[in-house]
Amino acid sequence: MRRPLRRDFVWGVSTSSYQIEGAAQVDGRGPSIWDGFCREPGRIANGDTGDQACDHYHRYREDIALMQSIGVNAYRFSTAWPRVLPKGRGAANEAGLAFYDRLVDGLLEAHIEPWVCLYHWDLPQALQDLGGWTNRDSAEWFADYARLIAGRLGDRVKRFATFNEPSVFTIFGYSAGGQPPGTKELESFYATIHHVNLAHGAAVDALRGVAGASIGVIHNMQPARPAHPTPADGKAAAILDDIWNRAFPDPQIIGDYPASLRAGIDLHRREGDMERICRPIDWLGVNHYSPIYAKAEGASPLGFAWAEVPADAPRSPIGWQVDPEAFRDTLLDAHDRYGLPIYVTENGAGAAEKLDAAGGVNDVERIDYLSRYIEAMREAAEKGADVRGYFVWSLLDNFEWGAGYTNRFGLVFVDYATQKRVPKASARWYAATIKAHAAQATS
Ligand code: IFM
């Protein structure tokens, strides 16, 4: 018989503020960089925006009931900086803070532990107008925001993460395009990496003010593979690996940047910065979906170009490679390199889905993906990775950034026109998985 996961294993679901909350102009929320970006022609599929999304701001009680029916014991969500500080700093918005009070209280009443992430990409526009993450002051803006959330929720919330996937919003926001602010300047890109790292360290210190806080950070980690077995593509993949997988966790946890980034970062680094960045944390969040590929591209400022998934690779309905062994190996590598307790804070599969004739969604491909990935996680745990929890991305179908509402990742289908929620077959499957674990853990 397989060795079971830890008795206290955390089973959860994840979401983020801009992707589900909606209520973008309600109760004093200020604009975020995504509000404006979505309105730029051609940026988002179908011109979609997060204005309404899943209207979770008003329907959070129903969403908590859905979590209860699935049986999760943790919910990871992000607080929207512009909802609590409409201008990013200065006067707090009481109505915004009160929303998170209600959400946290509702979760605790339902015996679901709130896991709060401070930043899932929705920077207040007012701060972007001051240069956003290219401005070194951003570290202090972020620490002040962290203090505000810690002071308000810290009596009830103990699990905090500073950032979600900093390499994604810095690469796509400042180098490759596709996310706000949509600039492509190498120097801004390096500045952003360093300032986000400083902001992480400053926020960790701020969050330590919460008695009993368990503080982590959430990184996307995926093997970066060469498109072809050539030395040039091997080098391209190594550069992508440094930028995608190492540029943030290495300085935050090990205290140094990968060698290939040092010259670019040095322009922005001041004495004492590495100590400011590398603050002790309690856990590492790993988001993982599939491997990524790079090829040599002499003309590219970073020395690589993104490459397609190999034609013969198994894929999810939205074309992402399905490779559970890569997930197992990622967890083992993260364990060896960083030595922290690991929580898988995102994993899931996207699809373009509709309700079937019976009014449900029989998402067998998602169930197959999740069961194979959970099995791979078990293998990693058996081989020694200290994996303590798993959160499916996502509870609900939601606003999938550049893809708008076309890609659905939810265990629960959302009919955006009516806001009706319909649990998919995967929601029932996940409920049964959690139950089976509980039965095994108590036997
Ligand atoms: O929806 C995103 C999430 O915001 C960050 N991680 C990947 C998910 C799926 O693309």
Image (cartoon, rainbow, N blue to C red):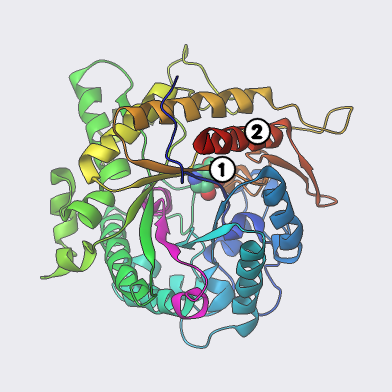
Residue 434: x %, y % from top left: 59, 38
Q: Is residue 287 above or below residue 49?
A: above
Residue type at mark 2? Ala
**Which residues are the magenta region?**
150-174
Q: Residue furthest right?
A: 357
* Quarter residue 77 falls in: bottom right
Q: Position of residue 145 (x, y in %)?
A: 44, 76
Q: Quick one: 375 or 244, which is closer to the camera?
A: 375
Identify residue for label 2. 432
Q: In the picture shown, does residue 120 fall above or below 355?
A: below
Along the line of sight, which residue is nearer the eye, 65 or 237?
Answer: 65
**Residue 389 drawn at (x, y percent):** 45, 44
Q: Residue furthest left?
A: 271
* Residue at horizontal 28 percent and vertical 72 percent from the top: 136
Q: Amino acid at mark 1?
A: Trp
Q: Is residue 164 magenta?
A: yes
Residue 291 in view (yes/no):
no
Image coordinates for residue 271, horizontal then vertical, percent:
10, 70
**Dot label at residue 393:** 1
Does residue 18 appear to the left or right of 423 in the view shown? left
